[in-house]
Amino acid sequence: MAYYRKIGEVPRQRHTQLRDSAGALRYEELMGEEGFSSDSSLLYHRGVPTAITASEPWELPDLATTANHPLRPVHLSLHALFDDAEAKALDPVTSRRLVLGNGDVRISYVVAGAPSPYYRNSTGDECVFVEEGTGTVETVFGVVPYRAGDYVIVPRATTHRWVPAELSRLYAIEANSHISPPKRYLSRFGQLLEHAPYCERDLHGPDEPFVVDGVDVEVLVKHRGPGPSGIVGSRLTYATHPFDVVGWDGCLYPYTFNIEDYMPITGKVHQPPPVHQVFEGYNFVVCNFLPRKVDYHPLSIPVPYYHSNVDSDEVMFYVAGDYESRKGSGIGLGSITLHPGGMAHGPQPGAVEASLGVQEFDETAVMVDTFRPLEIGEAGTQTDDGVYAYVAARALIDRPD
């Protein structure tokens, strides 16, 4: 983000001394992207941020994937993955289960009620959509509260901990890159433009430092290495608590954005998915489809036309409401559909006719489009209904002439 913030104690000029009231020196850390060539922040620690006393392997959850071959659309039911009673003892990091993934992005799901370990993803940014629940994310930058409908954006290599206040359903999008607003929404200096469907006022970062005392603090680190998708884990022990930052300033920090603050763009006829985009990463985009007025042409067809997006796979996570184009397909809340590139997809038979004359949609869904084919993780394999690919053909057979 190019939206500058300053929190807590910082010196008047960067790279100059900052001392506490007793004269002890604070230790400056630059956290920056793309090798000093992109967004960064300066953090001021009480302790030395490089001091570790141990490094051990962390065995990650199963990240293996299976190719979607032979090619077919897939319907997955994420709500079947976790028992709510058992989930109260699970945490939002180590209990994630991989649904879909490729070399650019991984999509996981978790239901959790317990605090996570201290954690840092050093492979890329995370965008975690909160389907249900409230709580906080404690970070080196401060505390970020979350609630249902939030996207929680955590920059790469940010040490943090999830602390649910209640059972939370979380849809985690883990990138191998950075995640940011689409470039077309930004001025050449980084301000969100008037035609963007949200603005800086809608982004909520930490408000004050969050300082914790402690020694020999364990942090789980996900990083590049010889594991599935090129990812492995390490368990680092820090001599002093990572949450010892007394102040920071810059344009790199965690924040939340809630879908209630997104202003859908509509038109005279059906608008394509890019108008619903909210974020982008390398080789993927994130969109959301929200309650809205729909097309006002007298002959409009409100549901999507059949389309072959030949360069990307489309993943739709159904969060709330009634998704008009999927009626009769078996899809419900908590469902995911994967429509792979290379084949057409669109409304179920009968959905086009049923939509004629409709003036508004009551639906909430989060979409991820990837430009590299997605493979199926263990959680996806477990919840694949096995029949979704053939629902349209069966509906045509059963439909009276």
Image: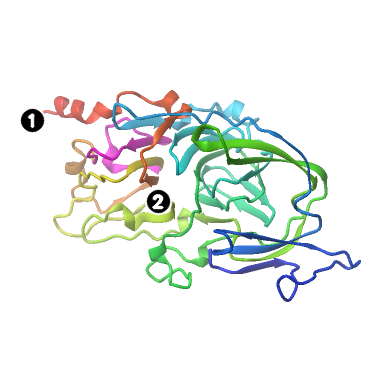
* Residue 356 in picture, x, y percent from top left: 18, 48
* Residue 267 in picture, x, y percent from top left: 25, 61
Residue at point 72%, 75% (across, down): 13
How many callouts does the rendering have?
A: 2
Q: Is residue 384 visible?
A: yes
Which one is closest to the eye, mark 2 or mark 1? Answer: 2
Query: Please, what is the three-letter code of the amino acid marked with disc 1?
Result: Asp
Mark 2 and mark 1 lie on one chain; the one further toward the N terminus is 2
Does residue 334 show up magenta in the picture? yes
Q: Is residue 322 visible?
A: no
Judged from the image, the secondary structure of the residue bearing numbered disc 1 is loop
* Residue 95 in picture, x, y percent from top left: 59, 32
Q: Is residue 368 left or right of residue 130?
A: left
Query: Please, what is the three-letter code of the amino acid marked with disc 2?
Result: Val
Q: Magenta stretch: dominant SS?
A: loop
Over which residues does the magenta segment extend?
320-346
Q: Is residue 47 left or right of residue 117?
A: right
Q: Which residue is mark 1?
A: 401
Q: In terms of image quadrants, where is residue 384?
A: top left
* Residue 181 in picture, x, y percent from top left: 45, 60
Does residue 201 show up magenta in the picture? no
For the C terminus, the quadrant is top left
Residue at point 33%, 60% (across, down): 265
Report the front residue among 149 and 98. Answer: 98
Q: Is residue 266 left or right of residue 219?
A: left
**Extreme residue toward the right, this view:** 22
Residue at point 54%, 48% (across, down): 124
